[in-house]
Image (cartoon, rainbow, N blue to C red):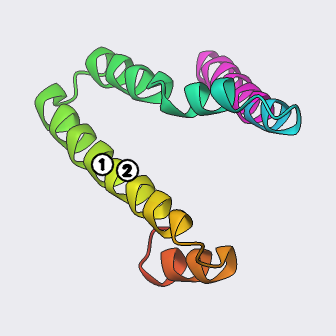
Amino acid sequence: MVHLLKYSISGIIGATLFILIYHFSLKKNLGLCALITALPFMGLFGLYTIYNNKGSVNKYLLKIVMFYSLYIFLFYGIYLLYKKRINYIYLLELCYYCGLL
């Protein structure tokens, strides 16, 4: 029963973050929309759960650094492609075929 409560709270928090991102994008509040996606809420929660469950914190942090590096390169690449006015459909197809989506 305790696990169900933990999963429910995690699900509500995750859904709330997605709803906030959608809401701020509708209101064209790009600053808050970008801030929510850039803050490492999930990474800190993952670190907390790894630590509480006696997992390897060092391996987790190394993987987080690797994934954030890829994340930065992905969005920088999207930014550069957008500056050159490449079609969004082509961009999404490229990300899909590269395994990023």
Corner quadrant of residue 51: top left
Report, in whole angstroms, how far the alpha carbon at label 1 lies from the one at label 2.
Answer: 6 Å
Name the residue type under label 1: Phe
**Which residues fall within the magenta stretch?**
1-20
**Camera-side residue of 15 and 29:** 29
Task: Tell me what residue is drawn at x 48 percent, y 69 percent.
Answer: 81
Can you identify the residue that label 2 sits on? 71
Asked if the residues shown at circle 1 and circle 2 are in contact, with their CB atoms under 8 angstroms apart, the answer is yes
Examine the rendering and report whether any part of residue 17 can be seen: yes
* Quadrant into which the C terminus falls: bottom right
Q: Nearer the viewer, mark 1 or mark 2?
A: 2
**Camera-side residue of 4 and 38:** 38
Task: Tell me what residue is drawn at x 44 percent, y 63 percent.
Answer: 80
Can you identify the residue that label 1 sits on? 67
Q: Position of residue 83 (x, y in %)?
A: 52, 63
Q: Is residue 8 magenta?
A: yes
Corner quadrant of residue 19: top right
Q: Position of residue 5 (x, y in %)?
A: 68, 18
Q: Position of residue 68 (x, y in %)?
A: 31, 43
Mark 2 burial class by Cα count in 10 Å: few <14, some 14-19, many 20+: few
* Quadrant into which the N terminus falls: top right
Name the residue type under label 2: Tyr
Residue at the front extreme? Answer: 84
